[in-house]
Image (spheres, rainbow, N blue to C red):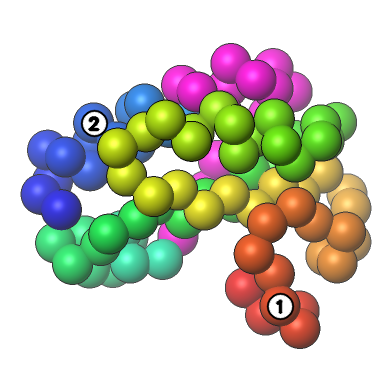
Amino acid sequence: MTRSQLKTHLARAIEALLKVDKNIRAIVLFGSAVYASKLACDLDFLVITERKKPCGHYFDAVVDLTVWVDVIVQQRGEKVGGTCGGRRDGVW
């Protein structure tokens, strides 16, 4: 995706996530959009919030975007393992 497309997708995804959870403290972009944006076909986010909502809230927020979005949600202070999203065997 081009730099312009990435900026547009990022803005829309972040806005949508912040609308569903006012307690979000950080949204971290990781994956191919960071290190190979021209080859990226999706956005991967780690969302850190004060009070986690049911996972569906976050997924529903980004489902209508024109790019695939993967969301991992972690409550501040929560040990890794009780997350929403794509975690497998403790490896992100």
Asked if the stretch drawn in magenta spans residue 17, the answer is yes
Q: Which residue is mark 2?
A: 8
* Position of residue 59 measured from the top left corner of the image (x, y, whole percent): 60, 39
Q: Quadrant of the C terminus?
A: bottom right
Q: Residue at x 23, y 43 (%)?
A: 6
Magenta range is 15-30
Q: Which mark is residue 7?
A: none
Mark 2 Cα within 10 Å, few/some/many (few <14, many 20+)? Answer: few
CB-based contact (under 8 Å), mark 2 and mark 1: no
- Nearer-the-camera pick, 70 or 49: 70
- Residue 25 against residue 87 in the figure, above or below: above
Q: Which residue is mark 1?
A: 88
Left or right, 91 with reference to 5: right
Furthest-bottom residue in view? 89
* Position of residue 81 measured from the top left corner of the image (x, y, whole percent): 85, 67
Give the residue type at disc 2. Thr
* First reached walking from the N terminus: tag 2 or tag 1: 2
Secondary structure found at label 1: loop
Give the residue type at disc 1. Arg
